[in-house]
Image (cartoon, grey):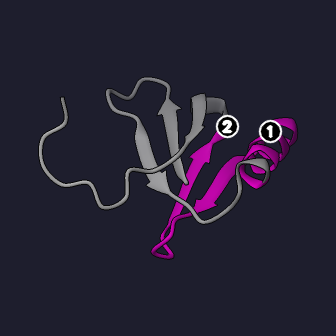
Amino acid sequence: MEVKIGVQNAARELTIDVEETPEAIEQLVADAVSGDGVLNLKDSKGRRVIVPVAKLAYVELGHGTAGQVGFRG
């Protein structure tokens, strides 16, 4: 699943592919926001993305575009 994270004062959003369900990601975001800490996600390649919740602008959950090659219109 593809997760897009908007970070305040950053020109680009972070886009990562994760293996968790949308419900699990939603719970991680809710826990991070209520705890006033950090959002900690692991992508499908084992890398970690850590964002302070004070800098979160938005988190968008969607389906990835696996296997797509070439130009998009």
Residue count near mark 2 (Cα–Cα under 10 Å), binned few <14, some 14–19, many ≥20? some
N-term-proximal mark, 1 vs 2: 1
Residue at numbered disc 2: 53
- Whether residue 34 sits left or right of residue 38 in the image: it is right
Instruction: State the CA–CA distance, disc 1 to disc 2.
Output: 6 Å
- Lateral position of residue 12 relative to residue 43, left or right: left
Residue 46: image location, x then y, percent: 51, 76
Q: Residue at x 82, y 47 (%)?
A: 27
Residue 34 horizontal/vertical position (percent): 87, 37
* Residue 57 lies in quadrant: top right
**At 60% across and 34% down in the image, what residue appears?**
59
| Vertical position of residue 52 compared to residue 16: above or below | above
- From the viewer's perspective, is residue 28 above or below residue 72? below
The residue nearer to you, when weighing 52 against 60, is 60
Q: Looking at the picture, does residue 28 appear above or below residue 55?
A: below
**Residue 25 lies within the magenta run:** yes
Residue at 42%, 46% in the rendered image: 15
Residue 4 placement (x, y as % from top left): 49, 40
Q: In terms of secondary structure, where does tag 1 sit?
A: loop
* Of the pair 47 and 21, the residue shown nearer to us: 21
**Furthest residue to the left?**
70
Q: Amino acid at mark 1?
A: Asp
The magenta span reads 24-52
- Identify the element where label 2 is drawn: helix
Q: Amino acid at mark 2?
A: Val
Judging by the rendered image, the residue that carries numbered circle 1 is 36
- The image quadrant where one finds the N terminus is bottom right
Q: Is residue 10 magenta?
A: no
Q: Is residue 50 above or below residue 11?
A: below
Q: In which quadrant of the rendered view does residue 45 lie? A: bottom left
